[in-house]
Image: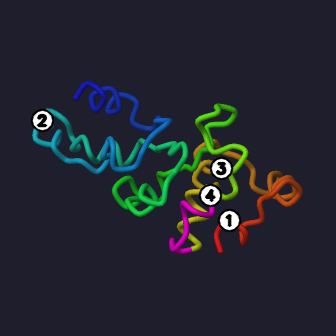
Amino acid sequence: MAFALGIQRVINNKFTFENFVVGYQRPGDTRLDTLSAELPLRPSEYVRRNCWFGASMLSAADAARRDEAGVGRVMWGADYPHTEGTWPHSKDAMTAAVDGIPDDEARRMLGLNAAEFYGFDLDVLEPIAARIGPAPASAVG
């Protein structure tokens, strides 16, 4: 409730929750919506409008639940350089996480969402990504 009140005051701000597991915190959960009598929007609407989720070590099970957070809100992460992260097997982890997910959704979760959230210039990043990889086809298809 306090979070929703704070978001109402800073309506255009964006927030990201890191080390997020899709389905664990359940961003689509509407249980708090019953407490929103004095808010113009329901708490779940504030989350959908203002929040993104850094899914460190995104699993196939997390990716399967991507609609709970919204495909456009999930951002893949490797938790590098922590040893409990996916490095040095990040490419394999990416591929396993999005196996069977439509390419456009996988690309959003693996990079485009983060690029948009942080305001990265994709034209500047493209030659770097081409040089250091992984190639989109190897991670997605």
- Quadrant the N terminus occupies: top left
Query: How far is mark 1 from mark 4, CA to CA?
Result: 6 Å
Quadrant in the rendering for residue 109: bottom right
Residue wearing tag 2: 35
Residue type marked 4: Met
Residue wearing tag 4: 94
Residue wearing tag 3: 115
Q: Residues within 10 Å of mark 4 (few under 14, many from 20)?
A: many
- State the residue at coordinates (19%, 47%): 30
Between 30 and 106, the residue placed more toward the observer is: 106
Q: Earlier in the sequence, mark 1 or mark 2?
A: 2
Q: Earlier in the sequence, mark 3 or mark 4?
A: 4
Q: Nearer the viewer, mark 1 or mark 3?
A: 1
Query: How far is mark 1 from mark 3, CA to CA?
Result: 17 Å
Question: Residue 139: which numbered mark, if any?
Answer: 1
Quadrant in the rendering for residue 40: top left
Horizontal and vertical percent position of residue 79: 61, 37
Residue type marked 1: Ala
Horizontal and vertical percent position of residue 125: 80, 52
Element type at marker 2? helix
Element type at marker 4? helix
Residue type marked 3: Ala
Q: Earlier in the sequence, mark 2 or mark 3?
A: 2
Q: Earlier in the sequence, mark 1 or mark 4?
A: 4
Q: Which stretch did the figure color magenta?
A: 94-102
Element type at marker 1? helix
